[in-house]
Image (cartoon, rainbow, N blue to C red):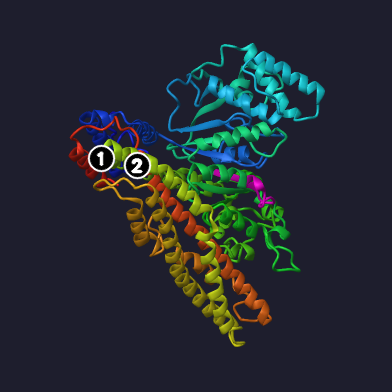
Amino acid sequence: MGRLTQESCKLLQDERLVERFNDVDQILSEATAKLPRFADRDVVGRVKEELSKLAVEMTRQRFSIGFIGPSQAGKSTTVGNLLSVSKDECPAPQGSGGPTTSVPTRLVPCAAPHPQCQPGERHYIELQYMNTAQFRDRLKDLCRICKLTYDENRRALLEAAQRQTAEQPHFKAPDHGVLIGLLKAALEFPDVIQETSKVEVGDFKKRRDYATHQEKPSKYTLLREVRIYFVTDAMSHEIDMIDLPGLGVDKESDDALTIAFLPHVDGAFMFQESHQMKSGTVSTLAEVMRDQHKNTLGGRVWMVVTKCDNLNDLQLNGPPEDASQPSAFCHLNDTLKNQGLGGDAVIFVGNYYYTKLLALPRQPDGSLSRPTPEIQSQFETVLKFDADGNPVVPERCQRYPGQVEPWRRFVIDGGLSNLRETMQSKVADSVRSQTKRAVGDRLTRIIDGLIGALEVAEQQSGMSTEQMRSAAMWSGRLSSIAETVANDARFSQPLVDVVEKNMDNLLEGWGMPADRNLAANHSNLARVLARSGAEEAGAQTRLIAAEVKKVFEDESSRQAAPDAPGFDTPLQHWAKVCEDFLEPGRSAGRVEFRQPVFNGIESDPSPFDAGGQQMLAVGDYLEIMRRKVRRASQVYGSRLVDEMRHHIENLADRYRAVGSEVDCIDPGAKALYAEFRSRLSTLR
């Protein structure tokens, strides 16, 4: 693999990460050159493949940011306003009253017209058609939706779809229409679907024809993506903006298309109408991205709340007769929290209000004018200013600090300047930070995998064939022990029972907190329970670990474990696990897990308010606390079992590796294995 340069990885802006990658690649090249049999190992092939994929990721020239959300949430209109262009020049189709995007449309911001633009043109459009594999996947998705058996014979599949439509005209009719249209287009234009995606130059004036569902099938029905090179300074030139079909319309196939595209985006603006804050669409979209980005969406996703200029007083302030009922801001806060987003990852937008401001003369500095009294009266519910002319933030919004500034920006100019600033700088910088972290983590996993392979080869070089055969046999025994530990209640239930009983005794002795300052006294009790519970769980962990040790001893008495220099027997390995991890309550990643579980007793909501005004009967209070203790004990018992199983399975994997690929050992290379392993360890 060629050496990466800072210039080729300029999107990352991280010289140390590039050097680290090159060092790993260099060590791997040296190791495979000097250790030809090691080079034949399966794991080395996988490491090379992972490094190649990582190199592609590191040398990308742009980040891909999706514009996603429910249909008719205002994505296309917002794009037009964001770019400050008319409807005629807007790259995204608008104004049909129905879903306006059926093909992913990639907007590539440019400082100057594309080199292949015709004279007098500013924007360049490129049509990318589905390749054979993508077309097959699309058909399979549609067959699943329509409950049809997929057939490689396109004509036969078309006839089956038409028969089903005739027999069940109302069943998934819109999706049947998409499937039939695709098949007809493929049969009518057989040269379009190829092994490598066909690319054509399009006409910017016809972009609506390319990006929307057409009544009659055409070759544009077979498009995978429309790519528009758009001259603008309203967005960072380090990002591509991808407008994806909206979710929640009559075509489930559009939903599937958008969801299938999400793994290809680095971040997203999730559009949500202001009166539908609790829509499940955001959760559906976020779940797919969370899987792709390893559970972390903070810094990658922003909520764009549209139609804020249409909010009513009830949505802004909640029911006046019940202050505890939620407002739109409360629902938004819940959505941000549930999806793991920052409390300030929101942009409030009012496109209609913004267009009213656009019609006014500009201020001397070129910015939009403040709303006139007529405009204020038109949007009087949301546009409020104090005596100094500053935006007034609704009281319910003020409860969530992250939402305050976005609301002020909305009141000033419809929120479009906030969105534009975010697109110009914040998105690229934030996604860059997240991407560097993800790339660094992937590189660490590659290093760990290579170190592990070298450790195995080094170990094998000092073992006899019989010892390696014994290790392979023991790997199966260890996997069986791991399953036993995971499924046998004796490795968790005694711990749970004892912790619950001892904590119950403590509760009975403590009783109900004193009437004076109930909340503070409860807090003290919860703290004592959390500490005492963790201490008792630690004592019981030692007893459970001793039970597991007996299992190892019994198995070792039936079949001796391989005894080779530097190779831990199961009992030796378990002793280290107990000392380094189980005894101090640390996970395999050396993160403390025992005390945090029991801290939940303390951090759980108090049954009393801050003033200690809520009265409970003694029995009710003790039952609440017992449930807290029971839940913490059960969670810890389950977590302990998972940790023990993980350590045993790791040993089984190591034994399995030592017992495999015995023909891939370089003779007399023990020192070389150790040398390369040591060099890689400095790069972790």
Q: Please say whether residue 100 is visible from this viewpoint.
A: no
Q: In which image quadrant can residue 215 be found? A: top right
Examine the rendered structure and indicate whether residue 447 appears above or below residue 631: above
**Residue kind at label 2, given as amino acid type:** Ala
**Residue kind at label 1, given as amino acid type:** Met
Pointer 2 residue:
471
Examine the rendered structure and indicate whether residue 300 appears above or below residue 99: below
Q: In which image quadrant can residue 11 be found? A: top left
Q: In which image quadrant can residue 399 be found? A: bottom right
Estimate how packed mark 1 is, as few (under 14), some (14 to 19) or many (20 or more) residues with alpha carbons within 10 Å.
Answer: some
Q: Where is residue 551 in the image (x, y as percent from the top left)?
A: 43, 55
Residue appearing at x 52%, y 43% in the figure: 291
Residue appearing at x 49%, y 57% in the figure: 641
Pointer 1 residue:
463
Q: How far apart are marks 1 and 2 (CA)?
A: 10 Å
- Magenta stretch contains residue 272: yes
Secondary structure of the residue carrying tag 2 is helix
Residues rendered magenta in the picture: 269-282
Please state which of residues 117 and 188 is positioned toward the viewer in this rendering: 188
Left or right, 339 with reference to 327: left
Examine the rendered structure and indicate whether residue 18 appears above or below residue 115: below
Q: Do the residues labelled 1 and 2 touch (CB within 8 Å)?
A: yes
Q: Which of marks 1 and 2 is nearer the N terminus?
A: 1
Estimate how packed mark 2 is, as few (under 14), some (14 to 19) or many (20 or more) residues with alpha carbons within 10 Å.
Answer: many
Please state which of residues 674 and 271 is positioned toward the viewer in this rendering: 674
Secondary structure of the residue carrying tag 1 is loop
Q: Where is residue 433 in the image (x, y as percent from the top left)?
A: 40, 47
Left or right, 280 with reference to 269: right
Residue appearing at x 54%, y 37% in the figure: 262
